[in-house]
Amino acid sequence: MTASLAVIFAGILHAIWNAIAKGGADRWASFALIGVGQSLVILPLVPFVAPPAPAAWPWLIASLLVHLAYLGLLLKSYGLGDFSQVYPLARGSAPLLVTLVAAVALGERPSWTQLAGVLAVCGGLAVLALAGAREVDDRAVAAALLTGVSIAAYTILDGIGVRDAGGAASYIVWLFALEAPLTVVLIYAIRGRASLLERLDRRQCALGLGGGLIAMAAYGIVLWAQTRGTMASVAALRETGVISGAIIGAVFFAERMGVRRVAAACVVAAGVVLITAH
């Protein structure tokens, strides 16, 4: 129960840092600042944390590459669609893929209750993709679903890697110690220092740095939970954050929600909870 509640809380944190990234005047700069905030906290810890066991490194490196692809897809998604549409699509599609891979590759067959959850998620996602907008941007939907694929991929890779690492703390610290600085370097190489900073004020810098800490806490909780439960269950519980994402989109971004989109977000959340049933 403690792990489940922690993962639900992680889902709320994840929605918050995504809203910070989406709401920045320059999303590239927001993601760079998130990486800076993570680097400032995590790099001083590296000398005090043993590296993960050798068996975990292939999974960690593969996850690192997928995480970088995920950030690029997320940037593209937020540039094309509403937060309250893109966020639930990206997050809600991931546990479906994790459940499918777990069933096919790992032999984790879903129960009838879990299958009902899968169907609920599919129905809710269909409504979220179509409701609340006069026109549906197919590019935004495609980018969000590809983001979901990347989420499922790194969830599976990290789920295996953290169990082989010899300790969750070791895997968490070294993953962020590699990912955070590399994210900053890549964005700097793509955009340049001037273009990243020219439109940022002190408030946006503080939000970006704070968002990095929130993002790190959110995924750190998930990695810890993956050592105590199945990947499909953790992935599904985490995505209850889609409700928070829908509320944030309506309240802070003045996005049109409507009764159908609110109901759909709740159906998606109920579905991912059903997926965790045993």
Image (cartoon, rainbow, N blue to C red):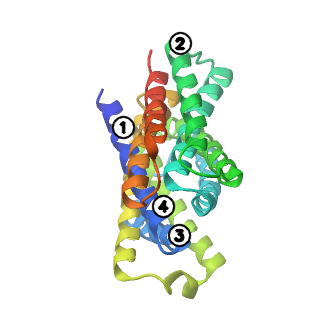
> Helix or strand or loop: what does disc 1 sit on?
helix
**To which residue does mark 2 refer?**
111
Which is more N-terminal, label 2 or label 1?
Answer: 1
> Helix or strand or loop: what does disc 4 sit on?
helix
Residue located 45% across and 71% down the image: 33
Of discs 2 and 3, which sits in the foreground?
3
How far apart marks 4 and 1 lie (CA) works out to: 25 Å
Give the amino acid at mark 1.
Answer: Ile
Of discs 4 and 1, which sits in the foreground?
1
How far apart marks 1 and 2 lie (CA) works out to: 22 Å
Judge by depth and name the residue closer to the eye, 9 or 123. Answer: 123
> Helix or strand or loop: what does disc 2 sit on?
loop
Judge by depth and name the residue closer to the eye, 274 or 98. Answer: 274
Instruction: Give the position of the N terminus as an image quadrant.
Output: top left
How far apart marks 4 and 3 lie (CA) works out to: 22 Å
Say above or below: 156 vs 78.
above
Of discs 4 and 3, which sits in the foreground?
3
Image quarter for residue 42?
A: bottom left
Judge by depth and name the residue closer to the eye, 114 or 6. Answer: 114
Say above or below: 119 vs 186.
above
Q: Residue furthest left?
A: 2
Residue located 42% across and 65% down the image: 43
Give the amino acid at mark 2.
Answer: Ser
Give the amino acid at mark 4.
Answer: Ala
Viewer can see residue 88: yes
In the drawing, what numbered circle is on residue 177?
4
**To which residue does mark 3 refer?**
27
**Residue contact at pointers 2 and 3, CB within 8 angstroms:** no
Which is more N-terminal, label 1 or label 4?
Answer: 1
How far apart marks 3 and 1 lie (CA) works out to: 26 Å
